[in-house]
Image: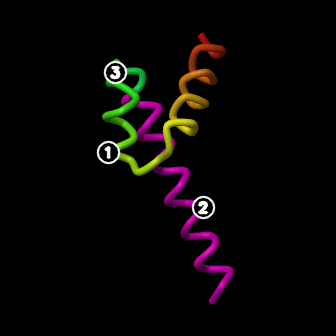
Amino acid sequence: MEIVTSWGEKAAQKTREEIAANLLREGMSIETIVRVTGLTVEQVQQLQSQLTQEN
């Protein structure tokens, strides 16, 4: 059962990161994205850096 839980948690984390990336692309503030997704400020800032490097 532990494997399923771990897989589910990883999938949920990936989904939150994808949503955060989309919100960053739309210009939403980091603080709002943190509140909406439950990610940390550091995680959102890292995503923002990755998006900046891609463009």
Magenta stretch: dominant SS? helix
**The label number, if any, that marks residue 10 in the structure image:** 2
Towards the viewer: 54 or 49: 49
- Whole-Å distance between the Cαs marked 1 and 2? 18 Å
Q: Residue at x 41, y 25 (%)?
A: 24
Q: Is residue 5 left or right of residue 24?
A: right
Three-letter code for the amino acid on which mark 3 is drawn: Glu
Decide which of tag 2 and tag 3 comes sooner along the chain. Answer: 2
Amino acid at circle 2: Lys
Asked whether the beta carbons under mark 1 and mark 2 sit within 8 Å of each other, the answer is no
- Secondary element at tag 1: helix
Regarding mark 3 in the picture, which secondary structure is present there? loop
User: Which one is earlier in the sequence, the residue at label 1 or at label 2?
Assistant: 2
- Side (left or right) of 45 relative to 20: right
- Residue drawn at (61%, 80%) of the image: 4
Badge number at residue 46: none
- From the image, state whether disc 1 or disc 3 is nearer to you: 1
Label 3 sits on residue? 26
Give above or below for 25 relative to 39: above
Residue highlighted by disc 1: 36
Disc 2 + disc 3, Cβ < 8 Å: no
Residue reaching furthest top? 55
Mark closer to the observer (1, 2)? 1
- Inspect the image, locate mark 1, and give the three-letter code of the amino acid beneath it: Val
> In the rendered structure, does residue 27 fall within the stretch colored magenta?
no
The CA span between labels 2 and 3 is 25 Å
Magenta segment: 1-23
| Location of residue 6 (image quadrant) | bottom right
**Element on which disc 2 rests:** helix
Residue placed most toward the observer, 47 or 18: 47
Q: Residue at x 39, y 41 (%)?
A: 34
